[in-house]
Amino acid sequence: MGVIARQSIKGALANYLGVAIGFFVSFFVLTRYLTQEEIGLTRVLVDAAVLFSSLAQLGTNASVVRFFPWFKDGRNNHGIFGWSLLLPLAGYVLFALLFLAFREPLLEVYARNAPLVADYFYMVPMLTFFALYTTVFETNASVLMRITVPKLVREVGIRLFNLAAYLLYGYGLISLDVFVWVFCGSYGLAMLLNLCYLLSLGHISFRIDRSFLDCDKVRDILRYTLFMTATVLAGNIPLFNSLFLGAKAGLAMTGVFTIAAYIANVVEVPYRSLGAISRPVIATAVKEERWDEVNRLGRQVSLHQLLVSSTILYLIYINLDTLFALIPNGGSYAGGKTVVLLLGLAKVVNSSFSVCTDILNFSRQYMWSLLYIALLTGAAIGLNSQLPEGEGAIDGAAAATLTAYAAYFILLFRHLYVHLGRISVFSRGQAKAVAVMAAMAVAYLAWSSAVEPVLPLGLLGVAVVRTAVLGGMLAAAVYFWRVSPTVNGLVDAGLRKVFPGKFKNNS
Protein backbone atom coordinates (compact mmCIF):
# COMPACT_ATOMS: atom_id res chain seq x y z
CA MET A 1 0.00 0.00 0.00
CA GLY A 2 3.03 2.30 0.15
CA VAL A 3 3.03 3.09 -3.57
CA ILE A 4 -0.76 3.41 -3.54
CA ALA A 5 -0.63 5.83 -0.62
CA ARG A 6 2.15 7.99 -2.09
CA GLN A 7 0.65 8.21 -5.56
CA SER A 8 -2.86 8.71 -4.15
CA ILE A 9 -1.70 11.59 -1.99
CA LYS A 10 0.16 13.22 -4.89
CA GLY A 11 -2.79 12.65 -7.18
CA ALA A 12 -5.20 14.06 -4.60
CA LEU A 13 -3.03 17.17 -4.24
CA ALA A 14 -3.10 17.62 -8.00
CA ASN A 15 -6.86 17.13 -7.97
CA TYR A 16 -7.44 19.68 -5.23
CA LEU A 17 -5.14 22.20 -6.86
CA GLY A 18 -7.32 21.74 -9.92
CA VAL A 19 -10.41 22.15 -7.76
CA ALA A 20 -9.09 25.43 -6.39
CA ILE A 21 -8.41 26.72 -9.89
CA GLY A 22 -11.72 25.35 -11.11
CA PHE A 23 -13.53 27.05 -8.22
CA PHE A 24 -12.09 30.41 -9.20
CA VAL A 25 -12.72 29.88 -12.91
CA SER A 26 -16.27 28.55 -12.53
CA PHE A 27 -17.57 31.02 -9.96
CA PHE A 28 -15.64 34.23 -10.64
CA VAL A 29 -14.80 34.03 -14.35
CA LEU A 30 -17.49 31.95 -16.06
CA THR A 31 -20.40 33.57 -14.21
CA ARG A 32 -19.01 37.03 -14.95
CA TYR A 33 -17.83 36.85 -18.56
CA LEU A 34 -20.01 34.15 -20.13
CA THR A 35 -23.77 34.04 -20.40
CA GLN A 36 -25.74 31.06 -19.14
CA GLU A 37 -26.19 29.97 -22.77
CA GLU A 38 -22.45 30.12 -23.48
CA ILE A 39 -21.68 28.14 -20.31
CA GLY A 40 -24.26 25.58 -21.41
CA LEU A 41 -22.65 25.40 -24.86
CA THR A 42 -19.22 24.53 -23.48
CA ARG A 43 -20.77 21.92 -21.19
CA VAL A 44 -22.75 20.21 -23.94
CA LEU A 45 -19.73 20.10 -26.29
CA VAL A 46 -17.44 18.64 -23.62
CA ASP A 47 -20.00 16.14 -22.31
CA ALA A 48 -20.81 14.94 -25.84
CA ALA A 49 -17.09 14.50 -26.56
CA VAL A 50 -16.47 12.64 -23.29
CA LEU A 51 -19.42 10.32 -23.89
CA PHE A 52 -18.41 9.57 -27.48
CA SER A 53 -14.74 9.14 -26.56
CA SER A 54 -15.71 6.68 -23.82
CA LEU A 55 -17.51 4.56 -26.40
CA ALA A 56 -14.71 4.96 -28.95
CA GLN A 57 -12.22 3.57 -26.43
CA LEU A 58 -13.85 0.16 -27.01
CA GLY A 59 -13.11 -0.62 -23.38
CA THR A 60 -9.36 -0.24 -23.91
CA ASN A 61 -8.64 1.51 -20.62
CA ALA A 62 -10.25 -1.20 -18.51
CA SER A 63 -8.56 -3.96 -20.52
CA VAL A 64 -5.13 -2.32 -20.14
CA VAL A 65 -5.60 -2.33 -16.37
CA ARG A 66 -6.95 -5.90 -16.34
CA PHE A 67 -4.37 -7.49 -18.64
CA PHE A 68 -1.30 -5.50 -17.67
CA PRO A 69 -0.30 -8.11 -15.03
CA TRP A 70 -0.28 -10.72 -17.84
CA PHE A 71 1.83 -8.57 -20.17
CA LYS A 72 4.24 -7.21 -17.58
CA ASP A 73 7.63 -8.94 -17.57
CA GLY A 74 10.14 -6.73 -15.77
CA ARG A 75 10.68 -3.74 -18.03
CA ASN A 76 9.25 -5.57 -21.03
CA ASN A 77 5.51 -5.10 -21.46
CA HIS A 78 5.16 -7.04 -24.72
CA GLY A 79 3.42 -4.27 -26.66
CA ILE A 80 0.32 -3.71 -24.52
CA PHE A 81 0.77 0.02 -25.10
CA GLY A 82 0.51 -0.58 -28.84
CA TRP A 83 -2.84 -2.27 -28.31
CA SER A 84 -3.94 0.73 -26.27
CA LEU A 85 -3.44 2.96 -29.32
CA LEU A 86 -4.80 0.78 -32.09
CA LEU A 87 -8.14 -0.26 -30.59
CA PRO A 88 -9.25 3.30 -29.70
CA LEU A 89 -8.25 4.43 -33.19
CA ALA A 90 -10.56 1.79 -34.66
CA GLY A 91 -13.29 2.96 -32.30
CA TYR A 92 -12.78 6.57 -33.29
CA VAL A 93 -13.06 5.78 -37.00
CA LEU A 94 -16.33 3.97 -36.29
CA PHE A 95 -17.58 6.93 -34.25
CA ALA A 96 -16.65 9.38 -37.03
CA LEU A 97 -18.60 7.38 -39.59
CA LEU A 98 -21.65 7.21 -37.32
CA PHE A 99 -21.38 10.92 -36.57
CA LEU A 100 -21.45 11.76 -40.28
CA ALA A 101 -24.38 9.42 -40.84
CA PHE A 102 -26.53 10.81 -38.00
CA ARG A 103 -25.33 14.41 -37.93
CA GLU A 104 -28.52 15.91 -39.32
CA PRO A 105 -30.92 14.14 -36.90
CA LEU A 106 -28.69 15.17 -34.00
CA LEU A 107 -28.71 18.79 -35.13
CA GLU A 108 -32.51 18.78 -35.37
CA VAL A 109 -32.71 17.73 -31.71
CA TYR A 110 -30.94 20.92 -30.61
CA ALA A 111 -32.07 23.34 -33.33
CA ARG A 112 -35.18 24.62 -31.49
CA ASN A 113 -34.03 25.02 -27.86
CA ALA A 114 -30.25 25.18 -28.25
CA PRO A 115 -29.30 26.73 -31.63
CA LEU A 116 -25.75 27.49 -30.43
CA VAL A 117 -25.11 23.77 -30.10
CA ALA A 118 -26.30 23.24 -33.66
CA ASP A 119 -23.93 26.00 -34.83
CA TYR A 120 -20.84 24.42 -33.24
CA PHE A 121 -21.66 20.72 -33.26
CA TYR A 122 -19.01 20.18 -35.95
CA MET A 123 -16.38 20.64 -33.20
CA VAL A 124 -17.44 17.43 -31.44
CA PRO A 125 -15.34 14.96 -33.54
CA MET A 126 -12.12 16.90 -32.93
CA LEU A 127 -12.85 17.31 -29.23
CA THR A 128 -13.72 13.60 -29.03
CA PHE A 129 -10.31 12.64 -30.46
CA PHE A 130 -8.51 14.84 -27.92
CA ALA A 131 -10.53 13.47 -24.99
CA LEU A 132 -10.04 9.89 -26.22
CA TYR A 133 -6.25 9.89 -26.31
CA THR A 134 -5.84 12.10 -23.26
CA THR A 135 -7.52 9.32 -21.30
CA VAL A 136 -5.61 6.54 -23.08
CA PHE A 137 -2.22 8.08 -22.24
CA GLU A 138 -3.35 8.74 -18.67
CA THR A 139 -4.35 5.08 -18.22
CA ASN A 140 -1.00 3.89 -19.55
CA ALA A 141 0.72 6.05 -16.94
CA SER A 142 -1.55 4.76 -14.16
CA VAL A 143 -0.65 1.08 -14.72
CA LEU A 144 2.98 2.15 -14.34
CA MET A 145 1.99 3.68 -10.98
CA ARG A 146 2.64 7.20 -12.29
CA ILE A 147 -0.55 9.27 -12.02
CA THR A 148 0.65 12.61 -10.63
CA VAL A 149 1.68 14.33 -13.86
CA PRO A 150 -1.37 13.13 -15.87
CA LYS A 151 -3.57 14.30 -13.00
CA LEU A 152 -1.86 17.70 -13.08
CA VAL A 153 -2.50 17.91 -16.81
CA ARG A 154 -6.16 16.94 -16.49
CA GLU A 155 -7.06 18.82 -13.32
CA VAL A 156 -4.77 21.85 -13.55
CA GLY A 157 -3.49 22.17 -17.11
CA ILE A 158 -6.85 21.98 -18.89
CA ARG A 159 -8.42 24.43 -16.44
CA LEU A 160 -5.61 26.95 -16.96
CA PHE A 161 -5.86 26.59 -20.74
CA ASN A 162 -9.63 27.07 -20.52
CA LEU A 163 -9.14 30.10 -18.26
CA ALA A 164 -7.02 31.74 -20.94
CA ALA A 165 -9.80 31.15 -23.47
CA TYR A 166 -12.47 32.57 -21.13
CA LEU A 167 -10.48 35.71 -20.39
CA LEU A 168 -9.61 36.34 -24.04
CA TYR A 169 -13.28 36.09 -24.92
CA GLY A 170 -14.50 37.94 -21.84
CA TYR A 171 -12.31 40.96 -22.62
CA GLY A 172 -13.46 40.98 -26.22
CA LEU A 173 -10.07 40.04 -27.70
CA ILE A 174 -11.50 37.08 -29.66
CA SER A 175 -14.87 36.32 -31.21
CA LEU A 176 -17.18 33.50 -30.15
CA ASP A 177 -16.01 31.41 -33.12
CA VAL A 178 -12.35 31.77 -32.14
CA PHE A 179 -13.21 31.16 -28.48
CA VAL A 180 -14.76 27.78 -29.30
CA TRP A 181 -11.65 26.79 -31.28
CA VAL A 182 -9.29 27.87 -28.49
CA PHE A 183 -11.46 26.15 -25.88
CA CYS A 184 -11.42 22.85 -27.78
CA GLY A 185 -7.70 23.24 -28.54
CA SER A 186 -7.03 23.22 -24.80
CA TYR A 187 -7.88 19.52 -24.73
CA GLY A 188 -5.58 18.88 -27.69
CA LEU A 189 -2.69 20.47 -25.82
CA ALA A 190 -3.46 18.28 -22.78
CA MET A 191 -3.35 15.20 -24.99
CA LEU A 192 0.11 16.14 -26.32
CA LEU A 193 1.44 16.81 -22.82
CA ASN A 194 0.30 13.38 -21.62
CA LEU A 195 1.94 11.72 -24.61
CA CYS A 196 5.22 13.52 -23.97
CA TYR A 197 5.18 12.47 -20.33
CA LEU A 198 4.46 8.85 -21.20
CA LEU A 199 7.38 8.78 -23.63
CA SER A 200 9.64 10.42 -21.03
CA LEU A 201 9.22 7.43 -18.70
CA GLY A 202 11.84 5.75 -20.83
CA HIS A 203 10.70 2.14 -21.23
CA ILE A 204 7.48 2.56 -23.17
CA SER A 205 7.26 0.63 -26.42
CA PHE A 206 4.27 0.85 -28.73
CA ARG A 207 5.51 -2.05 -30.88
CA ILE A 208 3.25 -5.07 -30.42
CA ASP A 209 5.13 -8.25 -29.54
CA ARG A 210 3.38 -10.74 -31.83
CA SER A 211 5.43 -13.65 -30.52
CA PHE A 212 3.93 -13.13 -27.07
CA LEU A 213 0.33 -13.17 -28.27
CA ASP A 214 -1.39 -16.40 -29.22
CA CYS A 215 -4.91 -16.74 -30.53
CA ASP A 216 -6.40 -17.42 -27.10
CA LYS A 217 -4.86 -14.28 -25.59
CA VAL A 218 -5.97 -12.11 -28.49
CA ARG A 219 -9.49 -13.53 -28.25
CA ASP A 220 -9.65 -12.90 -24.50
CA ILE A 221 -8.42 -9.34 -24.91
CA LEU A 222 -10.81 -8.52 -27.75
CA ARG A 223 -13.80 -10.12 -25.99
CA TYR A 224 -13.17 -8.27 -22.76
CA THR A 225 -12.36 -5.00 -24.54
CA LEU A 226 -15.49 -5.02 -26.66
CA PHE A 227 -17.56 -5.98 -23.63
CA MET A 228 -16.20 -3.03 -21.67
CA THR A 229 -17.42 -0.69 -24.41
CA ALA A 230 -20.88 -1.08 -22.93
CA THR A 231 -19.85 -0.92 -19.30
CA VAL A 232 -18.15 2.48 -19.62
CA LEU A 233 -21.61 4.01 -19.78
CA ALA A 234 -21.91 3.52 -16.01
CA GLY A 235 -19.29 6.16 -15.33
CA ASN A 236 -20.85 8.57 -17.80
CA ILE A 237 -24.47 8.57 -16.70
CA PRO A 238 -24.23 12.23 -15.52
CA LEU A 239 -23.36 13.23 -19.09
CA PHE A 240 -26.88 12.39 -20.17
CA ASN A 241 -28.12 15.21 -17.92
CA SER A 242 -26.57 18.09 -19.85
CA LEU A 243 -27.26 16.49 -23.24
CA PHE A 244 -30.96 16.02 -22.46
CA LEU A 245 -31.25 19.39 -20.73
CA GLY A 246 -29.73 21.20 -23.70
CA ALA A 247 -32.27 19.64 -26.03
CA LYS A 248 -35.35 19.92 -23.79
CA ALA A 249 -34.82 22.96 -21.56
CA GLY A 250 -32.32 25.08 -23.51
CA LEU A 251 -28.76 26.17 -22.84
CA ALA A 252 -29.65 28.70 -20.11
CA MET A 253 -30.96 25.94 -17.81
CA THR A 254 -28.00 23.81 -18.85
CA GLY A 255 -25.73 26.65 -17.73
CA VAL A 256 -27.36 26.74 -14.28
CA PHE A 257 -27.08 22.96 -14.06
CA THR A 258 -23.40 23.17 -15.09
CA ILE A 259 -22.47 25.47 -12.22
CA ALA A 260 -24.39 23.31 -9.73
CA ALA A 261 -22.84 20.14 -11.15
CA TYR A 262 -19.35 21.59 -10.80
CA ILE A 263 -19.97 22.14 -7.10
CA ALA A 264 -21.21 18.56 -6.74
CA ASN A 265 -18.26 17.18 -8.73
CA VAL A 266 -15.89 18.28 -5.97
CA VAL A 267 -17.36 15.44 -3.88
CA GLU A 268 -15.87 12.85 -6.23
CA VAL A 269 -12.35 14.29 -6.47
CA PRO A 270 -10.65 11.92 -3.95
CA TYR A 271 -11.96 8.83 -5.74
CA ARG A 272 -10.28 9.87 -8.98
CA SER A 273 -6.86 9.42 -7.40
CA LEU A 274 -7.51 6.43 -5.14
CA GLY A 275 -9.53 4.67 -7.82
CA ALA A 276 -6.86 5.15 -10.49
CA ILE A 277 -4.10 3.74 -8.29
CA SER A 278 -6.10 1.00 -6.49
CA ARG A 279 -7.58 -0.62 -9.62
CA PRO A 280 -4.30 -2.29 -10.72
CA VAL A 281 -3.88 -3.72 -7.19
CA ILE A 282 -7.46 -5.01 -7.13
CA ALA A 283 -7.02 -6.46 -10.64
CA THR A 284 -3.96 -8.41 -9.48
CA ALA A 285 -5.73 -9.71 -6.35
CA VAL A 286 -8.74 -10.82 -8.41
CA LYS A 287 -6.49 -12.50 -10.98
CA GLU A 288 -4.79 -14.49 -8.23
CA GLU A 289 -8.18 -15.22 -6.58
CA ARG A 290 -7.10 -13.82 -3.23
CA TRP A 291 -10.67 -13.08 -2.19
CA ASP A 292 -9.85 -12.17 1.39
CA GLU A 293 -7.54 -9.48 0.04
CA VAL A 294 -10.21 -8.34 -2.42
CA ASN A 295 -12.70 -8.04 0.45
CA ARG A 296 -10.20 -6.11 2.56
CA LEU A 297 -9.30 -3.71 -0.25
CA GLY A 298 -12.93 -3.22 -1.23
CA ARG A 299 -14.05 -2.39 2.30
CA GLN A 300 -11.10 -0.12 2.90
CA VAL A 301 -11.61 1.85 -0.31
CA SER A 302 -15.40 2.01 0.15
CA LEU A 303 -15.30 3.17 3.77
CA HIS A 304 -12.79 5.93 3.22
CA GLN A 305 -14.46 7.14 0.06
CA LEU A 306 -17.77 7.30 1.95
CA LEU A 307 -16.16 9.24 4.78
CA VAL A 308 -14.34 11.70 2.56
CA SER A 309 -17.06 12.25 -0.03
CA SER A 310 -19.89 12.69 2.50
CA THR A 311 -17.78 15.10 4.56
CA ILE A 312 -17.03 17.20 1.49
CA LEU A 313 -20.70 17.26 0.48
CA TYR A 314 -21.72 18.29 4.00
CA LEU A 315 -19.23 21.17 4.17
CA ILE A 316 -20.28 22.34 0.72
CA TYR A 317 -24.01 22.21 1.39
CA ILE A 318 -23.93 24.13 4.67
CA ASN A 319 -22.15 26.97 2.84
CA LEU A 320 -24.11 27.01 -0.42
CA ASP A 321 -26.13 30.14 0.33
CA THR A 322 -22.94 32.02 1.16
CA LEU A 323 -21.33 30.87 -2.07
CA PHE A 324 -24.23 31.95 -4.26
CA ALA A 325 -24.28 35.33 -2.47
CA LEU A 326 -20.61 35.92 -3.28
CA ILE A 327 -20.25 34.88 -6.92
CA PRO A 328 -21.03 37.29 -9.78
CA ASN A 329 -24.67 36.96 -10.86
CA GLY A 330 -25.07 34.36 -8.12
CA GLY A 331 -28.80 34.92 -7.88
CA SER A 332 -29.19 33.51 -11.39
CA TYR A 333 -27.60 30.24 -10.29
CA ALA A 334 -29.06 29.88 -6.78
CA GLY A 335 -31.89 27.80 -8.20
CA GLY A 336 -29.38 24.98 -8.50
CA LYS A 337 -29.16 24.35 -4.73
CA THR A 338 -31.32 21.23 -4.85
CA VAL A 339 -29.29 20.02 -7.83
CA VAL A 340 -26.11 20.27 -5.74
CA LEU A 341 -27.63 18.12 -2.98
CA LEU A 342 -29.06 15.44 -5.28
CA LEU A 343 -26.02 15.24 -7.55
CA GLY A 344 -23.75 15.35 -4.51
CA LEU A 345 -25.54 12.34 -3.01
CA ALA A 346 -25.21 10.55 -6.35
CA LYS A 347 -21.46 11.29 -6.28
CA VAL A 348 -21.21 9.94 -2.72
CA VAL A 349 -22.93 6.71 -3.77
CA ASN A 350 -20.83 6.34 -6.91
CA SER A 351 -17.45 7.12 -5.34
CA SER A 352 -18.16 4.93 -2.30
CA PHE A 353 -19.25 1.84 -4.22
CA SER A 354 -17.56 2.01 -7.63
CA VAL A 355 -15.03 -0.43 -6.23
CA CYS A 356 -17.80 -3.03 -6.63
CA THR A 357 -17.85 -2.37 -10.36
CA ASP A 358 -14.07 -2.77 -10.48
CA ILE A 359 -14.19 -6.12 -8.68
CA LEU A 360 -16.85 -7.54 -10.99
CA ASN A 361 -15.20 -6.22 -14.15
CA PHE A 362 -11.84 -7.75 -13.25
CA SER A 363 -13.37 -11.14 -12.39
CA ARG A 364 -14.29 -14.02 -14.69
CA GLN A 365 -17.95 -13.07 -14.28
CA TYR A 366 -17.43 -9.67 -15.89
CA MET A 367 -20.07 -10.42 -18.54
CA TRP A 368 -22.74 -9.88 -15.87
CA SER A 369 -21.80 -6.20 -15.88
CA LEU A 370 -23.39 -5.91 -19.30
CA LEU A 371 -26.83 -6.64 -17.86
CA TYR A 372 -26.44 -4.21 -14.97
CA ILE A 373 -25.06 -1.47 -17.21
CA ALA A 374 -27.92 -1.96 -19.65
CA LEU A 375 -30.39 -1.53 -16.79
CA LEU A 376 -28.54 1.52 -15.46
CA THR A 377 -28.29 3.17 -18.87
CA GLY A 378 -31.90 2.41 -19.69
CA ALA A 379 -33.05 3.86 -16.38
CA ALA A 380 -30.97 7.01 -16.84
CA ILE A 381 -32.16 7.59 -20.40
CA GLY A 382 -35.76 6.78 -19.54
CA LEU A 383 -35.84 9.10 -16.54
CA ASN A 384 -34.08 11.93 -18.41
CA SER A 385 -36.43 11.60 -21.36
CA GLN A 386 -39.33 12.44 -19.02
CA LEU A 387 -37.81 15.71 -17.82
CA PRO A 388 -40.27 18.59 -17.61
CA GLU A 389 -39.54 21.88 -19.34
CA GLY A 390 -38.44 24.96 -17.41
CA GLU A 391 -36.64 25.21 -14.06
CA GLY A 392 -37.97 21.89 -12.81
CA ALA A 393 -35.92 20.10 -15.45
CA ILE A 394 -32.63 20.55 -13.61
CA ASP A 395 -33.94 19.08 -10.35
CA GLY A 396 -35.45 16.21 -12.31
CA ALA A 397 -32.15 15.50 -14.08
CA ALA A 398 -30.29 15.35 -10.77
CA ALA A 399 -32.94 13.09 -9.20
CA ALA A 400 -32.75 10.81 -12.24
CA THR A 401 -29.01 10.36 -11.76
CA LEU A 402 -29.32 9.56 -8.06
CA THR A 403 -32.16 7.07 -8.64
CA ALA A 404 -30.33 5.26 -11.44
CA TYR A 405 -27.13 4.87 -9.41
CA ALA A 406 -28.97 3.65 -6.32
CA ALA A 407 -30.80 0.93 -8.28
CA TYR A 408 -27.59 -0.10 -10.08
CA PHE A 409 -25.53 -0.60 -6.95
CA ILE A 410 -28.27 -2.50 -5.13
CA LEU A 411 -28.23 -5.07 -7.93
CA LEU A 412 -24.44 -5.12 -7.96
CA PHE A 413 -24.16 -5.67 -4.19
CA ARG A 414 -26.38 -8.72 -4.42
CA HIS A 415 -24.41 -10.21 -7.30
CA LEU A 416 -21.03 -9.87 -5.61
CA TYR A 417 -22.27 -11.44 -2.41
CA VAL A 418 -24.24 -14.31 -3.96
CA HIS A 419 -22.17 -15.19 -7.04
CA LEU A 420 -18.61 -14.10 -6.29
CA GLY A 421 -17.41 -15.66 -3.07
CA ARG A 422 -19.58 -13.62 -0.69
CA ILE A 423 -17.73 -10.43 -1.57
CA SER A 424 -19.08 -7.46 0.39
CA VAL A 425 -17.76 -3.93 0.73
CA PHE A 426 -19.97 -3.19 3.73
CA SER A 427 -18.49 -2.76 7.17
CA ARG A 428 -19.41 -1.51 10.63
CA GLY A 429 -17.48 1.65 9.90
CA GLN A 430 -19.84 2.54 7.08
CA ALA A 431 -22.87 2.24 9.37
CA LYS A 432 -21.13 4.52 11.84
CA ALA A 433 -20.31 7.00 9.06
CA VAL A 434 -23.95 7.16 7.94
CA ALA A 435 -25.10 7.67 11.53
CA VAL A 436 -22.58 10.48 12.02
CA MET A 437 -23.72 12.26 8.86
CA ALA A 438 -27.39 11.95 9.86
CA ALA A 439 -26.61 13.49 13.25
CA MET A 440 -24.67 16.30 11.56
CA ALA A 441 -27.63 17.06 9.29
CA VAL A 442 -29.78 17.55 12.41
CA ALA A 443 -27.03 19.70 13.93
CA TYR A 444 -27.03 21.93 10.83
CA LEU A 445 -30.80 22.42 10.99
CA ALA A 446 -30.55 23.34 14.68
CA TRP A 447 -27.66 25.71 14.00
CA SER A 448 -29.51 27.43 11.13
CA SER A 449 -32.66 28.03 13.14
CA ALA A 450 -31.36 28.73 16.64
CA VAL A 451 -27.74 29.91 16.54
CA GLU A 452 -27.00 31.60 13.22
CA PRO A 453 -29.76 34.25 13.39
CA VAL A 454 -28.31 35.72 16.59
CA LEU A 455 -24.64 35.81 15.57
CA PRO A 456 -23.41 39.43 15.31
CA LEU A 457 -21.20 38.65 12.31
CA GLY A 458 -21.17 39.39 8.61
CA LEU A 459 -21.73 36.94 5.78
CA LEU A 460 -18.16 35.60 5.70
CA GLY A 461 -17.80 35.64 9.48
CA VAL A 462 -20.89 33.49 9.92
CA ALA A 463 -19.62 31.08 7.25
CA VAL A 464 -16.25 30.72 8.98
CA VAL A 465 -17.82 30.09 12.39
CA ARG A 466 -20.41 27.70 10.93
CA THR A 467 -17.74 25.67 9.12
CA ALA A 468 -15.41 25.60 12.12
CA VAL A 469 -18.06 24.55 14.64
CA LEU A 470 -19.95 22.00 12.55
CA GLY A 471 -16.80 20.72 10.85
CA GLY A 472 -15.12 20.34 14.24
CA MET A 473 -18.11 18.41 15.57
CA LEU A 474 -17.99 16.11 12.55
CA ALA A 475 -14.26 15.45 12.93
CA ALA A 476 -14.63 14.78 16.65
CA ALA A 477 -17.50 12.34 16.06
CA VAL A 478 -15.50 10.40 13.46
CA TYR A 479 -12.41 10.24 15.68
CA PHE A 480 -13.91 9.45 19.08
CA TRP A 481 -16.40 6.92 17.72
CA ARG A 482 -13.50 5.22 15.88
CA VAL A 483 -15.32 5.15 12.55
CA SER A 484 -12.04 4.28 10.80
CA PRO A 485 -9.01 2.76 12.53
CA THR A 486 -6.86 4.05 9.66
CA VAL A 487 -8.03 7.63 10.19
CA ASN A 488 -7.50 7.36 13.94
CA GLY A 489 -4.02 5.97 13.36
CA LEU A 490 -3.09 8.86 11.08
CA VAL A 491 -4.45 11.43 13.53
CA ASP A 492 -2.66 9.79 16.47
CA ALA A 493 0.60 9.69 14.52
CA GLY A 494 0.28 13.38 13.75
CA LEU A 495 -0.51 14.26 17.36
CA ARG A 496 2.44 12.25 18.65
CA LYS A 497 4.76 14.15 16.32
CA VAL A 498 3.42 17.51 17.47
CA PHE A 499 3.13 16.54 21.14
CA PRO A 500 5.68 13.72 21.78
CA GLY A 501 4.70 11.39 24.61
CA LYS A 502 1.38 13.07 25.40
CA PHE A 503 -0.96 11.11 23.13
CA LYS A 504 -1.57 7.38 23.04
CA ASN A 505 -2.70 5.48 19.99
CA ASN A 506 -6.51 5.72 19.83
CA SER A 507 -6.92 3.56 16.75
Image: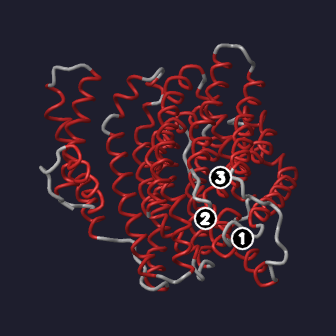
Q: At 80% from the left edge and 78% from the top edge, which residue is drawn? A: 213
Farthest residue in the top direction?
Answer: 172
Between the C-alphas of marks 2 and 1, the distance is 21 Å
Which label is found at residue 225? Answer: 1
- Residue at 79 percent of width and 38 percent of height: 123
Q: How many marks?
A: 3
Quadrant of the drawing holding the N terminus: bottom left
- SS type, badge 3: helix
Relative to 420, is 13 above or below? above
Q: Position of residue 7 (x, y in %)?
A: 50, 53
Q: Nearer the viewer, mark 3 or mark 1?
A: 3
Tag 2–tag 3 contact (CB < 8 Å): no
In this rendering, which labeled residue sits more in front, label 2 or label 3?
A: 3
For numbered disc 1, what is the local secondary structure? helix
Quarter the C terminus occupies = bottom left
- Of labels 3 and 1, earlier in sequence is 3
